[in-house]
């Protein structure tokens, strides 16, 4: 995919009165990094009440959900804390707990600032990120945020 366009998009969450998006028109180009409230609309998880969301001119509702999801790296505002190793917390975004492109994971770690978080862990990439288990470690909220950004970067399609 090269371009995602939104044309006069309106969206209100179910059960809410105030619109989250009100007449948004914009274009997102491949290889751009943007923060956007409304990612679920871009990924086809929600439908706009008015307007259109298109990927390379094709409406997101007409697209295969799996092909859309492979193109989107989602970083949640409240990141998930998986009781796995640091590496598995990153690779889960790629659909695997054990397979990762080491260079891509390291690049994502450097970009997100998580490389410092990982380096400070007792067993680094093998550190278990859960106090629930013997020898597990817990991260701070800011550290989890960096891991979540890295998770998105590791999943993002190569530019």
Image (cartoon, helix red, strand yellow):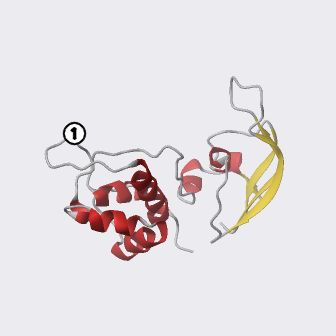
Looking at this view, name the residue that lies furthest to the top.
15
Residue 144 percent across, percent down from the top left: 40, 52
Q: Nearer the viewer, residue 64 or 28?
A: 28
When the figure is inspected, residue 34 is found, relative to residue 106, above or below; the finding is above
Give the total number of marks visible in the rendering.
Answer: 1
The N terminus sits in image quarter: bottom right
Residue 118 percent across, percent down from the top left: 31, 64
When the figure is inspected, residue 111 is found, relative to residue 46, above or below; the finding is below
Dot 1 lies on which element? loop
Residue 57 percent across, percent down from the top left: 77, 60
Residue 136 percent across, percent down from the top left: 20, 48
Q: Which residue is mark 1?
A: 132
Question: At x 52% / y 67%, what residue is drawn?
Answer: 157
The C terminus sits in image quarter: bottom right
Q: Quadrant of residue 28?
A: bottom right
Q: Is residue 9 visible?
A: yes
Q: Nearer the viewer, residue 9 or 80?
A: 80
When the figure is inspected, residue 7 is found, relative to residue 105, above or below; the finding is above
Looking at this view, name the residue that lies furthest to the left.
134
Which class describes the residues within 10 Å of circle 1: few (<14), some (14-19), or many (20+)?
few
**Is residue 34 shown left or right of residue 135?**
right
Q: Quadrant of residue 97?
A: bottom left
When the figure is inspected, residue 143 is found, relative to residue 38, above or below; the finding is below
Q: Is residue 97 visible?
A: no
Question: At x 71% / y 25%, what residue is drawn?
Answer: 16
Q: Nearer the viewer, residue 44 or 26?
A: 26
């Amino acid at each position: 995919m090269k371009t995602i366009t939104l044309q006069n998009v309106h969206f209100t969450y179910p059960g809410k009165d105030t619109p989250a998006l009100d007449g948004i028109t914009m274009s997102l180009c491949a290889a751009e990094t943007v923060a956007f409230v409304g990612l679920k609309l871009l990924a086809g998880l929600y439908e706009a009440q008015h307007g259109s969301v298109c990927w390379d001119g094709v409406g997101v509702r007409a697209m295969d959900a799996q092909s859309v999801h492979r193109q989107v790296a989602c970083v949640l505002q409240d990141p998930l804390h998986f009781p796995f190793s640091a590496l598995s917390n990153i690779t889960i975004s790629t659909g695997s707990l054990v397979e990762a492109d080491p260079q891509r994971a390291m690049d994502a770690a450097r970009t997100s600032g998580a490389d410092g978080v990982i380096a400070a862990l007792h067993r680094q990439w093998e550190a278990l990120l859960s106090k629930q288990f013997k020898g597990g470690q817990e991260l701070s909220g800011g550290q989890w945020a960096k891991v979540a950004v890295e998770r998105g970067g590791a999943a993002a399609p190569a530019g």
